[in-house]
Amino acid sequence: MVKELFNSFIHPWEIKAMYNLKFRDKIRQPKKPLVELIDGLDDRDFCYTALTKVSRSFAVVIQQLPEDLKDPVCVFYLILRGLDSIEDDMDFAQEPKLLLLRSFYEKCEINNWNIEGVGDSEDYRVLLKHFEKVIGLYLSLKPSYRKVISDITKRMGNGMADFAEKKVYSLDDYNLYCHYVAGLVGIGLSGLFSASTLESPMLETEERLSNSMGLFLQKTNIIRDYHEDLHSGRIFWPGEVWDKYSSEIGDFEKAPTQASSMACLNHLVLDAMQHVEDSLEYMSMLHNKQIFRFCAIPQVMAIATLAKVFNNSKVFTSNVKIRKGLGAKLMYYTNDMSNLRFEFHKCLLDIENKLNPLDPHYLVTKNKVEYLLNITSKEWKNPYYGIQYKLYRMVS
Ligand code: MG
């Protein structure tokens, strides 16, 4: 905490946000393993306990949602994490794994269904062993929510099974794989928002925009996690891109500052930036403030992460993260479209400042950044943002 306070010292508004996050935020991730926490819990309490255990950050953002949406989104998330954990279990034999991935949406309709000994970590094995509790909450949801969750689980399970048998190589594969594991989450959330009637029924039909929301997050994580993924023996960077720059994906770690390593990294950042415009358009369609925050917080964290990893050789040798204080600030102050555009605009300026004229994609990246700066520039011209912007430029 002391180190984090120090890092944010020149960004005073981050300290207030960090204070709020530290002392007002009720969500704490329990240290005990899930198995020791679940005795006697009903279905709903089990689901929320499992949620804080498998993803604290998601457990925090879910608190942003209107009451009506918390249970459906919590169940949706746990079902998809269950599916993902089956996909990631490397000790699970291929044939039954594929069968289970493809039929998981049907299992979710069976009262008391669960499975033992499957999952890629202890907590996930516990989740799947007690999956009847997740199913219990799922079956208590209204039919319009269940329909969305079931449809997405079916599509994602089949997509994961298809990719279990082939590798991601081309950019098309990369887009399709990210669609299955993340774009579908965006599409499903839009379906749930429409089903809640808190957002327009049209939102559900905006599959391209919803997909971009997921792809933007997923691609940003894939770029950032190069080092961690490399050392856990999996890599998601598409071969079609990286083999233009190196014969071995691991070579970037050995020569992180070499021009070809940076060119590869920046090429993938440029690819991820294609989703920014859709993401902003999607969020401008939202009416409910709580739903807006739920969607916008991860997106603004992603653009801040993308700005941090762009042209940053540390990606190849460490786990690059945004300052905790910046994360806290983005969480607390992302409340409407003008604030969101302003934050995106600042991150895009950071990227613009790091553009390297020797990069092979210099011109196309510069054009893209200028285009996005233009569509996000509306608000910061007003005096309030103008002053904040000047302060920001002084300290960064
Ligand atoms: Mg997976």
Image (cartoon, helix red, strand yellow):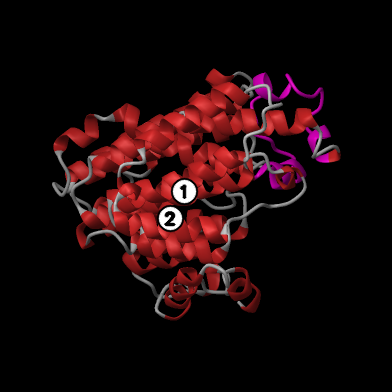
Q: Which of 149 and 249 is in front in this view?
A: 249
Membership of 343 in magenta stretch: no
Instruction: Look at mark 1 in the image and give the residue it sits on.
Output: 346
Identify the image quadrant of the C terminus. Answer: bottom right
Q: Nearer the viewer, residue 201 or 253?
A: 253
Amino acid carrying mark 2 in the image: Tyr
Q: Which of 209 and 392 is in front in this view?
A: 392
> In the figure, residue 265 lies in which quadrant?
top right
Dot 1 surroundings within 10 Å: few (below 14), some, or many (20 or more)?
many
Cβ atoms at labels 1 and 2 below 8 Å apart: yes
| Local SS, label 1 | helix
**Residue drawn at (38%, 32%) of the image:** 277
Identify the mark nearer the N-term, 1 or 2. 1
Instruction: Look at mark 2 in the image and give the residue it sits on.
Output: 389
Q: Which stretch is magenta?
A: 225-253
Identify the image quadrant of the N terminus. Answer: bottom right
**Residue drawn at (37%, 37%) of the image:** 279
Q: Is residue 245 above or below residue 46?
A: above
Q: In this view, does 352 lie above or below 367?
A: below
Amino acid carrying mark 1 in the image: Lys
Dot 2 surroundings within 10 Å: few (below 14), some, or many (20 or more)?
some
**Residue drawn at (22%, 60%) of the image:** 66
Would residue 113 be found to the left or right of residue 223 on screen? Answer: left
